[in-house]
Amino acid sequence: MRVAGRGWLMLMVAAFFGADAVMEATCSAIGFLVAYYAFKAYRFSGNVFFKLLYLGFMAISSAMIFRSSLIIILLSLSPAPFLTFIIKEASLIQSLVRALGYFLFIVAYVKQLKASKMEALVLTPILVSPLIELACICMLFYLVAHMLMLLLSTRNRDLLFILSGFTLFLASHALFFASISYSVLYLVGHVVQLLGSLCFLTVLVRVTKAR
Amino acid sequence: MKKYRSKLKIMSDMLSIIASEGRAGPTKIMYGANLSHERLVRYLNELEERGLIKEVKVEERSFYELTDKGSSFLTELRKLEAFAKAFGVEL
């Protein structure tokens, strides 16, 4: 009975990883197709945007096909040696390479913004660094998600103010980033940032009044 | 702010006009692609050298037609333009 249960579990694990590998291989094939088009566009136009797009999709798709092939090979071996260890390490490598791919996309769009004549005001390029703003957005997004989970589990009212503060900071950085194209958003971003600071001030006031 | 067209975009516009007319004269191409006479001559020469268009004479007047190579180039170019547009950029 126990042996039969173990066999069933192994089958479930194999089905899980098999489905994972097949879906990822499909995504990878689509990614390679997009990369091929991006490469063609680069050869036609010589625009660096498409070169970066090509490299980004190649990186992501290669990482996906590497991991899915590895899983398929491991599943075909019986018993698979170091199955969990290899899948864990392969997943880590895949995540890193995918992050690199997404970074290339960001660089492509930032370069494109600079190349186009969208920087209408001279001020915003001096005041805003697109890559740093994007990094801030990512970090604040994590903070907001974390605060939201905390709020849902504790239902503390002060946490709501902190969450609002970080959310408004996140919005302000998004506006700073967008100000590269529309300069007026830089000022709107500052108004939103001020509102975020007021949320933190509210918490401080509430804390000082606490008995 | 004035937006400048890339060389590829200008060529694409010229080829599109010729393709839509089947056969187009220089004046039609010049106005259709919004070009000066000097640029028109330069681009027409380049397109001809690349074998994308050919000059035909009808009753002593010059017209331009797409070659097979020009036709497939334009098809490919339109696909890539649509691809670039999907990513929010111009070819």
Image (cartoon, coloured by chain):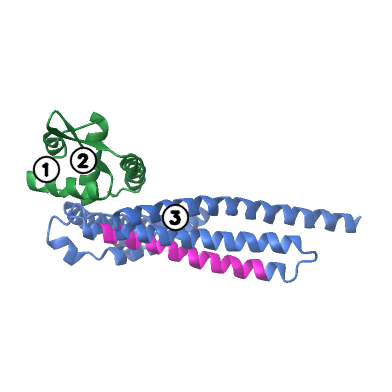
* Amino acid at dot 3: Ala
* Amino acid at dot 1: Leu
Look at the image and say whether residue A95 sits in the magenta stretch.
Answer: yes
Q: Between A86 and A32, which is closer to the camera in this rendering?
A: A32
Q: Residues within 10 Å of mark 3 (few under 14, many from 20)?
A: many
Q: Which mark is residue B35?
A: 1
| Mark closer to the observer (1, 3) | 1
- Which chain letter goes with mark 1? B
Look at the image and say whether residue A84 sits in the magenta stretch.
Answer: no
Q: CA distance from mark 2 to mark 3?
A: 28 Å
Spot occupied by residue A88 in the image (x, y as percentages of width and height) = 63, 68
Which chain is depicted blue?
Answer: A
Using the image, determine if residue B32 lies above or below residue B11.
Answer: above
Q: Colour of chain B?
A: green
Q: Residues within 10 Å of mark 2 (few under 14, many from 20)?
A: many
Q: Residues within 10 Å of mark 1 (few under 14, many from 20)?
A: some
Q: Are marks 1 and 2 on the same chain?
A: yes
Spot occupied by residue A77 in the image (x, y as percentages of width and height) = 77, 64
Pointer 2: what residue? Answer: B14
Stretch of the chain drawn in magenta:
A86-112
Q: Are marks 1 and 2 in contact (CB under 8 Å)?
A: yes
Pointer 3: what residue? Answer: A35
Residue name at image x 33 percent, y 48 percent: B84
